[in-house]
Image: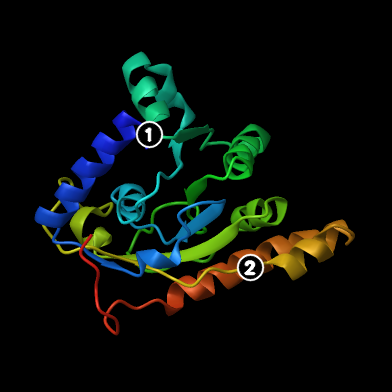
Amino acid sequence: MNPSYFIGWSLFRLLYRFYFRWRVFHPERVPLTGPVILASNHSSFLDPPLVGAGLKRDINYLARESLFRFPGIGALLRSWNSVPVDRDGGGGASGLRAILDRLLAGGAIVLFPEGTRSRDGKLQPARSGIGLTVIKSTALVVPVRVFGTYEAFGRHVKFPLPRRVVVKYGQPMRFETLRAEAKNCSRARLKEIYQQVADEIMAEIAKLEPCEDKATFP
């Protein structure tokens, strides 16, 4: 971790521990090195740093491209390994290329299969975009589920409330078979594969529940 990232990471860990009374389950399931896609549900602005703060490796994040136009904010986001994407245009080819470059360099990145924050705190259907990223990369995929962030700072909450938040990391997923098929299949089948991968990831996220395991206190 670079110094700026380490400071931010440490401050978020303190915030989640003392204000949100966080619980973390199975961070050991995430490899400490090598390319990893952390695929999480999304209910709040609290989710990206929560997923990253539970891990003792630096993580890459997506951030709206327009934020990088402000010199101070842009420099801070870059020091926190943020990837600029055009959110209005769905990220586009340049956003995908930037994500794949981070993975190719052995980095880990947080992606949200649902595409945007849930409006009611419930899991939403997965979009095919994450499937495309998975197929184009060689990264492991670790499903992640966060709990409590909608109640703490969902769309309906103006200021973060001191509600308990939880993050649980699932078992790594591998998609070698579908990646191999994608190299030679038709365009129609390729689109099906992208959605199939997205749906399989979302199904694994849905299976994650926090109550049956012992929590870790990082």
Say which amino acid is labelled 2.
Answer: Arg
Quadrant in which the C terminus appears: bottom left
Label 2 Cα crowd, 10 Å radius (few <14 / some 14-19 / many 20+): some
With 162 as the anchor, is 105 left or right in this view? right
- On the question of residue 1 being in view, the answer is yes
- In this view, 49 is above or below 87: below
- Label 2, label 1: how far apart the Cα atoms are: 27 Å
**Residue 68 or residue 124, whichever sits in front:** 68
Q: Quadrant of residue 209?
A: bottom left
Label 1 Cα crowd, 10 Å radius (few <14 / some 14-19 / many 20+): many
- In this view, 100 is above or below 129: above
Say which amino acid is labelled 1.
Answer: Trp
The numbered dot on residue 174 is 2
Q: Where's residue 194, x and y in %? A: 69, 60
Where disc 1 sits, the SS reads loop
For image coordinates 24% across by 68% down, the residue present is 216
Quadrant in which the N terminus appears: top left
Q: Where's residue 206, x and y in %? A: 44, 75
**Residue 69 or residue 99, whichever sits in front:** 99
Q: Where's residue 192, x and y in %? A: 75, 65
Mark with earlier residue (2, 1): 1
For image coordinates 13% across by 61% down, the residue present is 21
Instruction: Look at mark 1 in the image and give the residue it sits on.
Output: 80
With 156 as the anchor, is 122 left or right in this view? right
Q: Quadrant of residue 7?
A: top left
For image coordinates 29% across by 37% down, the residue present is 6
- In this view, 85 is above or below 120: above
